[in-house]
Image (cartoon, rainbow, N blue to C red):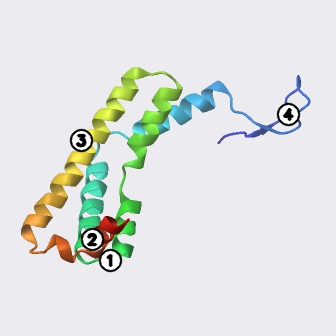
Amino acid sequence: MFNLFKRRSNSNQVNSFSANQSERDELCKTIINSSSLKAGFYLLLVLSSFIVTVGLLKNSIILTIGGMLVAPLLSPILSISLSITITNFKVFWRSIKIFVISAFISLLVSYCLGLIVKFSIFKIDLISSMGSI
């Protein structure tokens, strides 16, 4: 896909990382499109929020970290950094909006699950150990 090792004729460098303009444009489109709000994005977001909430309620670090790995929130963050790099403010505000909506949905799912399940916040080891840090 990307020809990373090219020989530059006007330089003394033998191997360097480079990509032509069409490859850069394709990469930008891929990153921006991966952070778009689609049904799969919402499904992964809801499932990861559910997994993290259950991990916190069951005091399971494995479930909490696993839920974070499933979360699709890295795509809007990558899109934000890309938009800053290429100075495209339309993409920047779109990515910020997607990230804020995604964070709100995650909090809403966790809040609803917290209302359904009876628990005491003082019995959650992960949260209580943060007070001693």
Q: Which residue is label 1 attached to? A: 60
Nearest to N terminus: mark 1 or mark 4: 4
Q: Which residue is label 2 attached to? A: 128
Nearest to N terminus: mark 3 or mark 2: 3
Residue at left offset 17%, top offset 57%: 109
Label 4, residues with CA under 10 Å away: few <14, some 14-19, many ≥20: some
Q: Secondary structure at mark 3?
A: helix
Q: Nearer the viewer, residue 72 or 125?
A: 125
Residue at left offset 39%, top offset 68%: 66
Circles 4 and 2: CB distance less than 8 Å? no
Q: Quick check: 116 above or below 2?
A: below
Q: Quick check: 70 above or below 8?
A: below
Q: Point out the frontmost of discs 3 and 2.
A: 2
Q: Which residue is label 4 attached to? A: 7
Label 2, residues with CA under 10 Å away: few <14, some 14-19, many ≥20: few
**Disc 1 residue type?**
Ser
Nearest to N terminus: mark 3 or mark 1: 1
Label 1, residues with CA under 10 Å away: few <14, some 14-19, many ≥20: some
